[in-house]
Amino acid sequence: MKLDIAQKKFIEELKSEGKSGATVVAYNKDIEQLLSFLSSKKIEEVEKISIEPIVAFMKDLGEKNYTPKSISRKTNAARTFIKYLAKEGYLKEDISSQLKHPKFETGAPRILSKMEYRALRDSAKNDVRSYAMIELLLQTGITISELAGIEMKDFEIKDETASLFIPKRNNKESRNIPVNKPAVEAVKKYIEDERSKVSGASENLFITKTGKGLLIRNIRSTIDRFFRIAGIEKAKVNDLRHTFVAFHLENGVSISYLAKVAGHKRESTTEKYLEYIKKPEKMDKTELTTL
């Protein structure tokens, strides 16, 4: 089988598994880059794939000054692709385990101070949609892709609070997240002042002026702009999630409960944040507080 055909089948498989659009695009680009390298080595059929040229591809990336983190991501894409080929019987042997990730140290999470996230709020206070997105990210700890995927039916308002349903996706289990009063008020104002006035809108909670669902890149560029306006340096959208987790651990929320709310597959992922906060004496709360 030709490698380009195998790539198309692999991408269709990812889509059928419910991978996010951003994840599919990232995998597609990484595999496309790998296959271009293999093609330069006269390898254009699945049956001719071996571990040596793939390792050579990763080494070539290092020589081109790709970061270890980028190479690790491409390694993961290559391993997933190989596993798929072996599972489907296109490749006789699963050689994915022979491909090793480069060693690199993960930096400390960027946790916003109270002054910083208040400044971010203030910078967006006159833009009801952006303010609602920032408040929801900060008060629930959801990811940017989860924010982009929220539909109106997922946000169930109950008086001053709400429940946000995040469906199963990218191997994460579905979960219900409690939404506090500040976030509910921000979302309600956005719906009443802007969203309700757009006719023929999609099912997405956050939409463009023409009614289409906001894309991840639109959300990222918007919030990055407000980081700059607020004068907050070296911050990214995902730092709102880091801040959410760190804040609640510091306020005594139990690791097991917070891991479920955040959608962490392992409690150890949540526990790592303890290195960067002042740990409370007791961590047994099973309700969220307000940032």
Image (spheres, grey):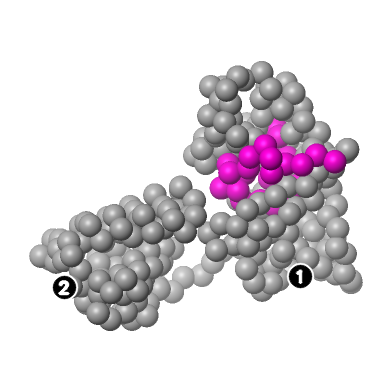
Say whether residue 231 is visible: no
Task: Using a 10 Å C-alpha cutoff, classify the residue at mark 2 as few (fewer than 14 neighbours), some (14 to 19) or many (20 or more).
Answer: few
| Badge 2 or badge 1: first in the primary sequence | 2
Question: In which image quadrant can residue 12 be found?
Answer: bottom left
> What residue is disc 1 on?
256
> What residue is disc 2 on?
48
Q: Residue at x 84, y 48 (%)?
A: 290
Instruction: Provide the secondary structure element on which disc 2 rests.
Output: helix
Is residue 76 placed above or below 200 in the rendered structure? below
Percent x, y of residue 160: 88, 38
Residue 283 lies in the magenta stretch: no
* Secondary structure that dominates the magenta span: helix
Is residue 242 placed above or below 78 in the rendered structure? above
Amino acid type at mark 2 = Lys
Mark closer to the observer (2, 1)? 2
Q: Nearer the viewer, residue 144 or 224?
A: 144
Q: Residue at x 65, y 32 (%)?
A: 130
Percent x, y of residue 103: 44, 74
Q: Nearer the viewer, residue 87 or 144?
A: 87
Instruction: Provide the secondary structure element on which disc 1 rests.
Output: helix
Residue 147 lies in the magenta stretch: yes
Left or right: 117 in relation to 265: right
Q: Residue at x 60, y 57 (%)?
A: 168
Q: Residue at x 73, y 47 (%)?
A: 164
What span is colored magenta in the figure? 131-158
Percent x, y of residue 161: 85, 42
